[in-house]
Image (cartoon, rainbow, N blue to C red):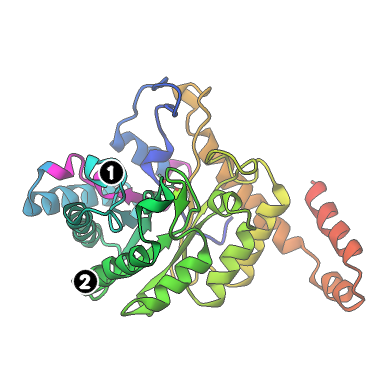
Amino acid sequence: MSGFKFSVGPWNVHEGADAFGPDIRPAIAFADKLATFRKIGFDAVQFHDDDAVPEINGLREPEIIARARDVRKMLDDNGLAAEFVAPRLWMDKRTADGGYTSNCPEDRAYAMWRSFRSIDIANELGCDKIVLWLAREGTLCAESKDTVVSIRRLVDAVNKMLAYDPKIKILIEPKPNEPIDRSFCGTMGHVMAVSAMTDDPSRVGGLLESAHAILAGLDPANEMAFALAMGKLWGVHLNDQNGMKYDQDKTFGAENLRQAFNQIRVLKDHGYGSGGEYIGLDVKAMRTQPVEISYRHLENSLNVVRLLEEKVDRFDRDIQKKLIEARDYEALEMVVLQLLLKG
Ligand code: 3MF
Ligand code: MG
C-alpha cells in the first residue's frame, strides 16, 4: 500500500517516435488509456490543453468548454481525477521562438490565448492547477532575446493568468535546456524567484521533474526540498536520466536508486501529498517495446515508488541520528547502501 496518490499523462503511452525515427507502435485510443491507467493504479490524469481538446486552435471558446466537459465525464466514468492542464506551447509555428517571451507580439498574444483556454479547460475538468513547462522560453541564439525583458514578460504572462482566474494555481516546471539551448527558468530556484516577482506568490509554485534537475547538474531530491521549504512543491514528475544528455524519461529509479530513494524520502518526510498533491510520473516506454507491453514502464515506476516507500519506512532513524552526532558519515552512507541492497 502506498501513502501517495498517483498521476500520469496520456503522452506517457506513445507511439515511439524520437528525433531520429518515426512511430513504431500503433496509437492507443484515449478512452482505452484511461481504463488501463485506472487498472494499474493511477488516481489522476495530467493533461495538455490539446490532450483534453484536440485541434484546439480551430475551435471557438464555447466549443472548447463543451469538449472539455465530455472529457470530465470520461474521467468520472473511470473513477479518475484531473491533476492539471498545461498549455502545449511548443508545437505551433507561432511558438517557434517561444510563447510568452517570443520577440513577436502576435505570438505572445497567441500564447496567452492558449493559457486562458487551459484555465477554462481546467475549470471544466475540476482541477485548479496549470503547469507551465516553458519549453521554448529561452534562446537558440544567445543574442536573439533580451533576457531581462524576457523574465519580465514571463512574470507578466503569469500575472495575466492569475488575474484571469482568482482560484487558479500556476506550477512552473523548470528545465535547463531542450528544445532550446539556454532556458530562462532552468531550476527550482528560478521558479521560486519568478513566483516571488508575481502579483500573488501564494498561487505560483513548482513542479519538479527528476530528469530536468539531473540535466541541470543538480540533485532532484534537493530541488524538491528547496520548493518544499517554501511550501511550494505542488507537483512532481518522477523519472530517471542517465547523465547530461538528451531528455530520456526513463523508469523511476532505473539509473540511480539512491537518488530515487532520496526523492521518496524527502517527499515522505515533509508530508508531500497532504495537500492533495500527486506523485506524477513522466516516463516513456523504450522505443523497442511492442504495443502489448507499452505500459510496463508505468507499472514498473509505480512499483519502484512503493518499494522505496518501504525502504524509507525501514531507514533506521536512531542509527541515522547517532551517526550524525558522531559525524561518522562513512558509516551512515553504508547504512543507506545496505538498506538499498538488502531485499
Ligand atoms: C518535457 C516535459 C513535458 C512536461 C509536460 C507537462 C512533455 O521535458 O517534461 O512533457 O512534463 O509538458 O508539463
Ligand atoms: Mg515533465
Horizontally, residue 29 falls left or right of residue 310, namely left
Neighbour class for label 2 at 10 Å: few (<14), some, many (≥20)?
some
Q: Secondary structure at mark 2?
A: loop
Identified by mark 2, the residue type is Asp
Residue extending farthest front = 143
- Total numbered circles: 2
Which residue is labeled 2 in the image? 165
Q: Pinpoint residue 180: horizontal percent, then vertical percent.
A: 43, 46
Identified by mark 1, the residue type is Asp
Q: In the image, is residue 207 part of the stretch drawn in magenta?
A: no
Q: Return the disc, 1 or 2, that comes first in the chain's sequence.
A: 1
Q: Pinpoint residue 209: horizontal percent, then vertical percent.
A: 51, 54
Q: Is residue 165 above or below residue 2?
A: below
The residue drawn where x is 36% and y is 61% is 146
Which residue is labeled 1 in the image? 51
Q: Secondary structure at mark 1?
A: helix
The residue drawn where x is 38% and y is 72% is 204
Q: Pinpoint residue 219: horizontal percent, then vertical percent.
A: 64, 58
Residues in magenta, as a range: 38-57
Q: In the image, is residue 47 part of the stretch drawn in magenta?
A: yes
Q: Nearer the viewer, residue 25 or 75?
A: 25
